[in-house]
Amino acid sequence: MSTISILMPVYNGMPYIKEAIESVMAQDYKDWELIISDNGSKDETLNYLDTLVDSRIKIHKQETNLGVYGNLNFLLERAETPIAKIFCADDKLLPGALEKSYLFMTDNPDCAICRCWQMGDTETDGPTGYGGSFGDVPVKLNPAAAILMFATFGNVVGSLSTAICRPDLVLKSGGFNQRLPAAGDYECWLRVAQRYGVAFLKEELIYVRMHEQQNSKLLNDNNQVCAQQNEILEHIFSIIDESDKNMIRKHWTLHFIAPRTSYAFKFLLKGKFQMAFKSWRALPANISAIKAIASYPIWKSKSSIYYISSNKLRDRINELNL
């Protein structure tokens, strides 16, 4: 009987999906089910899936593309075990990944969502690199501390493939919002963390492959991320403690909004003026675009000023987690 579900959404998964599934088959831990949902692939993915004969592998072929997050909701609803590992078709499981994921979630029965480390995270303490502060990350954060963690360091659950979850609790929290194709994972994990907190399995269990056809890169190329990130940050700002708002506003100006300067400049050089200005519309928490642009040299230099808000907010996260 399976004890962990592997949920694999795929769209045009060649040439990497074969290596991904081979990394599942190579695991020493064998009590798994692999549920694959093909989202209307146009390449050779379906032909490859037809060659898989292992009884633990269950394949669904969507007649209509559900979108990335619609496909993930479909998979969550079909998990037959209480613990699931999300696993994208272009990544690889490292040895021991399934057993360590299962044991961690079993040892932490109240954990709804956990981020494992991906290859390279050991050097940067996983999710904190985005905020510019490399310090120790607690194993578990309660909801209040988790919200501030998401506010400080962005989507701390990281890549979809670094997520381990309890499908029923994710669905009870509302599942993935298909209206946010560029930031639906950030928004979903934040909602789950608001209820249950978040945990971190500090072992490298996943190799996340970077390539030109990644969904996140294609969405970034169309500058869909900024507006959706603004919406999520505005929500976070409405639910964090009043005493933290001033520091968060300063932190976001430097760490979240200032980096958009180079992004917008690239669009300007290409003559894509509307794309460039999208970076500065409806900024969260009444952040000033002028202040963000003025902060860009500090963000670029990574001087001592760059780390002040990250370190103060890290201390605050640990205080809330007591």
Image: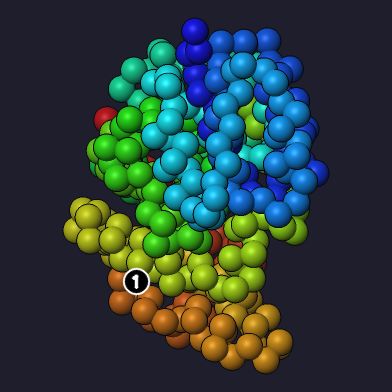
Residue 240 % position (x, y): 24, 54
Mark 1 sits on what residue? 284
Does any portion of residue 239 appear in the rendered image? yes
- The local secondary structure at tag 1 comes to helix
- Residue drawn at (50%, 61%) of the image: 182
Q: Is residue 215 above or below residue 281?
A: above
Colour scheme of the rendered structure: rainbow
Q: Residue 96: image x %, image y %? A: 65, 16
Q: Position of residue 112 (x, y in %)?
A: 35, 30
Residue name at image x 76 percent, y 36 percent: 48
* Picture quarter with the C terminus: top left
Identify the residue at horizontal 65%, vertical 61% (top origin).
217
Most distant residue in the right direction = 15
**Within the image, what quadrant is residue 317 found in?**
top left
At horizontal 38% and vertical 28% (from top left) the residue drawn is: 166
Nearer to the camera, 44 or 188: 44
Q: Is residue 140 above or below residue 33?
A: below
**On screen, residue 177 above or below 144:** below
Query: Within the image, what quadrant is residue 124 found in?
Result: top right
Residue at the far left: name it.
242
Which percent across, then down, holds residue 128?
A: 52, 45
Q: Tell me if residue 98 can be seen.
A: no
Identity, as a three-letter code, of the amino acid under mark 1: Pro
Q: Is residue 183 left or right of residue 170?
A: right
Q: Image check: 272 left or right of 185?
A: right
